[in-house]
Image: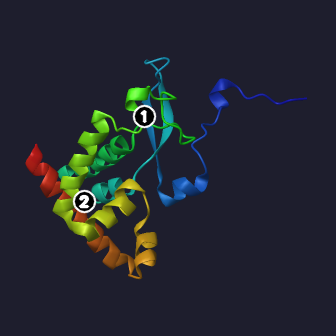
C-alpha cells in the first residue's frame, strides 16, 4: 500500500542539505506565482559576493557592480542553452561568425572595467564573481591564505564599484 502525504504535509525540495549548511542556498518565503494570495517557501542559490554584502564587507554600490559584472559577462558570451548550443539554432548566413550588438557592447564595457581593475583584479573578478569560486579555492589556486585572497578580491570589487559607480 502506497502512503500518500496530504498537501499540507508536503516537504519543499530545497536542494541538497549540504548546500544549505554551507550557506549557498538562502530559504525565503515569497508569493506563489500560480496563486498570489498564498505564500510558498523557496530556496535560492546566493552568489558568494552576496554573503560579503550581507556581512557588511561590501557596499550596495559594490554589490550592484558585481551583479552588473555577472550580467555583462553573460551578455558577452551570448545567449546559450545549458547544452552549450546558442539560442536560436542556426544563425542566418549574414550573422554567422559575427557577434551581436549586445555582445559587442558587453565586450566593450568589460574591457573598460578590466582596464580599471588591472590584470590581477580581472583574474580575481572572473574567478570569484563570474565563476562563483569560494575564497578558499581561489587562495588554494594562487598559493595564498584565504584571508589574503579575500583582501585581494575585496580590493578588486572596490575598484570595480568605483569604476561603474562613476558611470551612473
Report, in whole angstroms, how far the alpha carbon at label 2 lies from the one at label 1.
46 Å
Please name the residue shown 27% across and 47% down the image.
107
**Toward which corner of the image does residue 127 lie, by quadrant?**
bottom left
Please name the residue shown 57% across and 41% down the image.
83
Write down the residue under mark 2. 56
Task: Give the percent coordinates (x, y) of residue 141.
Answer: 45, 75
Q: Do the residues labelled 2 and 1 touch (CB within 8 Å)?
A: no
Vertical relation: 35 (above or below) 54: above
Vertical relation: 48 (above or below) 153: above
Q: On the picture, is 79 further left or further right than 7?
A: left
Task: Give the percent coordinates (x, y) of residue 80.
Answer: 47, 38
Residue 111: assigned label: none
Number of residue marks? 2
Please name the residue shown 54% across and 40% down the image.
82
Vertical relation: 35 (above or below) 9: above
Vertical relation: 6 (above or below) 48: above
Mark 2 / mark 1, whichever is N-terminal: 2
Q: Depth-wise, is mark 2 or mark 1 nearer the camera?
A: 1
- Label 2 sits on a secondary structure element that is loop
Residue 96: assigned label: 1
- Using the image as rendered, state which of residue 159 and residue 4 is in the foreground: 159
Q: How crowded is mark 2: few (under 14 residues within 10 Å), some or many (20 or more)?
A: few
- Which quadrant would the C terminus be assigned to in this image? top left
- Which quadrant would the N terminus be assigned to in this image? top right
Amino acid at each position: 500500500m502506497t502512503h500518500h502525504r496530504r498537501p499540507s504535509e508536503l516537504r519543499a525540495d530545497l536542494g541538497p542539505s549540504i548546500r544549505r549548511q554551507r550557506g549557498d542556498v538562502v530559504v525565503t518565503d515569497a508569493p506563489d506565482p500560480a496563486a498570489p494570495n498564498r505564500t510558498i517557501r523557496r530556496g535560492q542559490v546566493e552568489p558568494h559576493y552576496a554573503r560579503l554584502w550581507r556581512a557588511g564587507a561590501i557596499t550596495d554600490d559594490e554589490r550592484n557592480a558585481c551583479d552588473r559584472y555577472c550580467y555583462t559577462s553573460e551578455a558577452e558570451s551570448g545567449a546559450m542553452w545549458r547544452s552549450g548550443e546558442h539560442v536560436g539554432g542556426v544563425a542566418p548566413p549574414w550573422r554567422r561568425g559575427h557577434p551581436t550588438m549586445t555582445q559587442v557592447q558587453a565586450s566593450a564595457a568589460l574591457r573598460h572595467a578590466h582596464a580599471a581593475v588591472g590584470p590581477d583584479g580581472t583574474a580575481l573578478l572572473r574567478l570569484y564573481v563570474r565563476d562563483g569560486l569560494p575564497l578558499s579555492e581561489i587562495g588554494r589556486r594562487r598559493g595564498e591564505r584565504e584571508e589574503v585572497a579575500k583582501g585581494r578580491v575585496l580590493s578588486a570589487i572596490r575598484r570595480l564599484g568605483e569604476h561603474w559607480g562613476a558611470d551612473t
